[in-house]
Amino acid sequence: MVEHVAARTVADQRRVLDYWTPERMAKALPIGLLDVVTGERGLTGQVARLLPDLSGGRSDLAVPRELMGSNRLTGARPDTSTAGSRWMTGGLVSRTTGRVFLTVSGADFVCSASTIKSANRDVVVTAGHCVKDGAGAWAANWTFVPGYGTAGTHPFGKYTARRMFVASPWSRSGDDNYDVGMVVLNTSRGRHVADVVGAQDIAFNGSRGGQVFGFGYPADPPYDGTRLVYCAGRLRADPHRQTRDQGLGCAMTAGSSGGPWMTRFDPATGRGTITSVSSFKYSDDRRTMYGPYFGDAVKTLYNTAQRA
């Protein structure tokens, strides 16, 4: 496990909150475009990852617009099987899920995350690549906006990061099996995030497979990052056997990284148990999202974060 100290002082917190002007928030890009924007791995390599690769190469969640299929936005009644629909039922999930704004290598990005029940009432779970660029840089200016609304509204406040945690295999080599981050937040106006919006359960070492609901704020077309979107269906193993991750039929695009996957989810109340997060897609299958299995390493992250 690897830790990073973020905005701990009042001055640091104010600086981060002041950084995220409405204009910066509106212009922040999906984290899937990190390689293109920063050039750390080169534009040519990024384009190669985005093109279809029948050998089963992995890619981030950004895909070329001309290759993207359309998504259906349904009414208020939740579907138990959907590749991407707007969540219109409300409930707890509409408050506990939020957008993340962060800076990596001088560029601004967005991800998704969720509050989870914790002893300190300050922890959110997201993807590891929404916290640290694998073996590269930690994110700066990290801010969670629960229940993010249209026109950039933040009805429940904005919460800066105090401490960040990722698993050692993610920090060493960007191992997709460990693409999970736990972030401990500062309070907002003196209140813990879980006391304001509530929190979802989290579980580890559960049975593989089964029905899940996945949530996030996809920002690449046909989405714009202003609406909570969900996918629902049954999990399946990685057909390429390159990871221990599980796949969910889901057409959500970049920006949904880090969004929660819940088992035992009740659409009527919006409550569930988080057992994974949106992580990556294979470049030859844009309709399946993969999420890491929450095993002992993720449990260790959680136990450390909730005591921080």
Image (cartoon, rainbow, N blue to C red):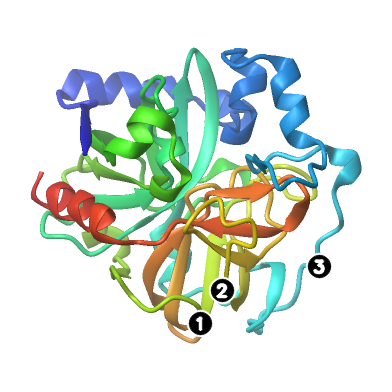
Q: Which residue is mark 2?
A: 235
x and y, in percent, of residue 225 in the image: 64, 46
Which-is-in-front pick, marks 1 and 3?
A: 1
Crowd class of label 2 (few under 14; some 14 to 19; many from 20; radius 10 Å)? many
Q: CA distance from mark 2 to mark 3?
A: 21 Å
The kind of residue on which mark 1 rests is Gly
Q: Quadrant of the C terminus?
A: top left
Q: Nearer the viewer, residue 70 or 127?
A: 127
User: Which of the 4 image quarters holds residue 240?
Assistant: bottom right
Looking at the image, is mark 2 or mark 3 nearer the viewer? 2
* Residue depicted at x 82% and y 42%: 52
Query: In the figure, residue 15 lies in which quadrant?
Result: top left
From the viewer's perspective, is 41 left or right of 67?
left
Q: Which residue is mark 3?
A: 72
Mark 1 secondary-structure assignment: loop
CA distance separating discs 1 and 3: 24 Å
Point out the residue furthest to the right here.
66
Find residue 219 and report its horizontal and vertical position in percent.
67, 43
